[in-house]
Image: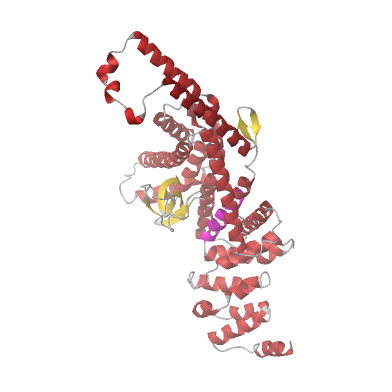
Amino acid sequence: MRESNDRIRRERASPSSPRLVLRRVVVLSEGRQFREAAAALQKLGPGAVAAVAGELPLDLLADGLPHSAQLLETLFNKLIAAGQRSVLDAEQVVWQLVKLLASHDDPTLKTKVARLARALLEYHPEFQALISTRKKDLEQAVQGLGCHGLTPDVTGLTHLHAAIKTELSRHIDSYKSALHRLDELGLPSTDNKKPVDASHQRLLGLRLSEVQQRLIDNKTLLTILDKPALKQLDSLVETLATRVQSDKEALFCVSQLKRLQQVGREDVPVAAILMSFSKGCSALLDLMQIPHSPCHSDTGYHSGAEQDQDVGKDAVSRYESLYQQSRPRAMEALDALPDLKHAAQLKAKILFSVVVLAFRTCKSLRDHKLLQACRALHVDPRCSASLPLRREALRCLAAAQEALPLQEAEDQVMGLVCEALKEYGCLGGCQALRKFAGEAARVAWALGCRMPAYELDTDFQTPTRLQPEKHQRHHSSSRNSDIVRSFLWPALLLHTNYVYKAIVVTDGT
């Protein structure tokens, strides 16, 4: 202990080079003198820190959380200032924070790591989507654990295994009766078949009594096989497949969490493990939210560019919320429609189309209003002089977006959907679907009334190869395949940057 203290004391002398600073930071960190290590690192310029950052023991610093939060915050802020956001893989720090927030009840913990959380978000903006996706996976896994209740049967509610056994018994009895009836009919065996007996000319020559007897024979077989009780097996098998997939997802999530820490005894409820880490993800996402107070900044003010960036982040968050919150509610309403009960792919395509149509409709509406503004002021919309007017008009439209009536866009989206699916008349009266269309139009308008505007990536060609920079695999997809078979949600673009990845389904060839 004395040797360690002496070593730390010797390192307190001011170093003269980045390498010596690095050595001092490592020594102080090993002695858990994180505050002094942060002070030493703070004295270096961003470029010098970026030059030696790759040699820092990031796993040691992550394990030192929350005490090492100030040191890590200083490190990431220096890398951000140097424009070196790929020097360190900070994901292990993110999951260490999630683990701490999931398992600690220290009321001061959030205060200790709040600045680090925001530095991580600025260092790697995709961390927010990564944590949000993990949180959603955990919540869906918990929900899947609870979907193993009683199953409807022709006799009422019963356990799934009992329902499958009863259904299979009915099938066996019916098939035996059908085989017995076929034997009674005395049909020729497959080894002694005569094609001429089933020829067109032979069948056209049947007498009335022969047609009547054929009808009686076929009707008897149909009565044996075509029973309502025999039509439940497909739905029971589908339910069984859903439950298998739900448990697979839950165990997959637990195996991922085991890589972060020991999940405790084997008798700990799986749902408790998943919900704990989901709570940690929620807490970290809350810490990553940038406060909306205009006074919140290290320099005491927000520049116009920073305010614009905050508005953009808010608009993208609304797009994410449209997928994570509004879409499940709309899907639940579609599930309740009898005509769409078993059309899972069609329901997903309907909601996907609503979003795409909302963006197209709002873009047309926006362009029409801009054209009206140019005409009212006698400005040629094709000349460069119209650009300042266009910019100011968009700013006004964006500022008034909440008060602007978008009923026209909502009606147009619903009209296009109902026109394309005339055979499903129930869609027109689905208020939840109309509400979803209205929310999609509102989000599309907020994203489109910007300079530059956010746009959807309209490359929906399938099958195609999964591209991690633009595609995010849905939790129900096969992880053994990188072939995209369908799109559940379109990607969002700013310039050529994917600010929100497309949600896709992959499966085998």
Name which residue lies at 51% across and 57% down.
309
**Residue 191 picture location, percent across and down:** 33, 31
**Observer-nearest of 416 and 289:** 416
**Residue 206 picture location, percent across and down:** 31, 13
Question: Per the image, is 138 magenta?
Answer: yes
Q: Quadrant of residue 68?
A: bottom right
Looking at the image, the residue that sits furthest to the top is: 208
| Quadrant into which the N terminus falls | bottom right
**Observer-nearest of 289 and 192:** 192
Check the image and report above or below for 51 versus 290: below
Q: In this figure, which colouring scheme has been used for the structure? A: secondary structure
Question: Per the image, is 284 magenta?
Answer: no
- Tally the marks: 0
Q: Quadrant of residue 370?
A: top left
**Residue 404 picture location, percent across and down:** 51, 38
Name which residue lies at 52% across and 49% down.
320
> Which SS type dominates the magenta stretch?
helix
Check the image and report above or below for 143 versus 424: below
Could one spot residue 338 in this view of the protein? no
Magenta region: 125-139
**Residue 103 picture location, percent across and down:** 70, 61
Q: Is residue 155 left or right of residue 451?
A: right
Name which residue lies at 47% across and 22% down.
181
**Observer-nearest of 286 and 376:** 286
Could one spot residue 478 in this view of the protein? yes
